[in-house]
Image: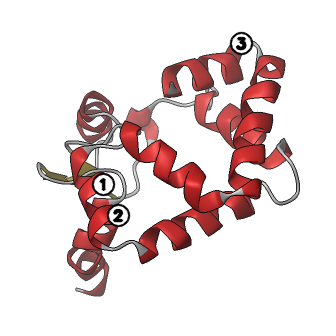
Amino acid sequence: MLRVLFGLARSMPRLLTPLLALDRLMLRSNPERAVKSLAGMMAPPDRELIEAAPELITDFARGLAEAYRQGIAGPMREAQLIAADHGFSLAEVLSPVHGYFAAQDRHVPPAMSHHLAKHLPNCTARFYENEGHLSIVKNRFAECLSDFLN
């Protein structure tokens, strides 16, 4: 689904309008139910996380609903920015970069993670085999933060 979303954002952004409008309707009308329906598409570590801590569904749902509070223009622009050619290669990014990658992430697939780690010249990459898109934040936050406190 994300490939379709970003492909449309790059080549035919107007076709995103009905998809984002539906997403907005679902998230603004009943955010918790919308997140529960999305759970089937989540990686196992993410599903396990929200099953073990149901309060996270409410927090996550609120955050997603808030993204649409003023309409679909913001999420549309975000998709376009993610999909856009940024006019430089990863090899040109000379600043130090810390990358935290979840092997079971369905939003940032492992191939993308490895590509970034390989092509960013000053990337310190950490790969977490048993984490997903959400679980890595919950389970590894303190560990990742420690990189910036030392």
Mark 3: give few (<14), some (14-19) or many (20+) Cα within 10 Å.
Answer: few
Question: Picture coordinates of residue 19 (x, y %)?
Answer: 72, 28
Q: Quadrant of residue 40?
A: top left
**What is the residue that sits farthest to the bottom in this orientation?**
149
Kindly report which numbered mark, 2 or 3, lies closer to the viewer in this rendering: 2
Seen in the image, is 106 located left or right of residue 21? left
Seen in the image, is 16 located left or right of residue 35? right
Question: First in sequence: mark 2 or mark 3?
Answer: 3
Q: Residue at x 22, y 42 (%)?
A: 104
Seen in the image, is 3 located left or right of residue 12? left
Q: Residue at x 33, y 31 (%)?
A: 112
Question: Picture coordinates of residue 97 (x, y %)?
Answer: 35, 56
Q: Which residue is mark 3?
A: 11
Q: Nearer the viewer, residue 85 or 74?
A: 74
Report how far apart the C-alphas of labels 1 and 3 lie in the structure.
Answer: 31 Å
Q: Are marks 2 and 1 in contact (CB under 8 Å)?
A: yes
Kindly report which numbered mark, 1 or 3, lies closer to the viewer in this rendering: 1
**What is the residue that sits farthest to the right in this orientation?**
70
Q: Residue at x 82, y 60 (%)?
A: 69
Q: Secondary structure at mark 1?
A: helix
* Colour pattern of the rendering: secondary structure
**Residue 46 badge:** 1
Kind of residue at disc 3: Ser
Q: Which residue is mark 2?
A: 50
Q: Quadrant of residue 51?
A: bottom left
Report how far apart the C-alphas of labels 2 and 3 lie in the structure.
Answer: 34 Å
Kind of residue at disc 1: Asp
Question: First in sequence: mark 1 or mark 3?
Answer: 3
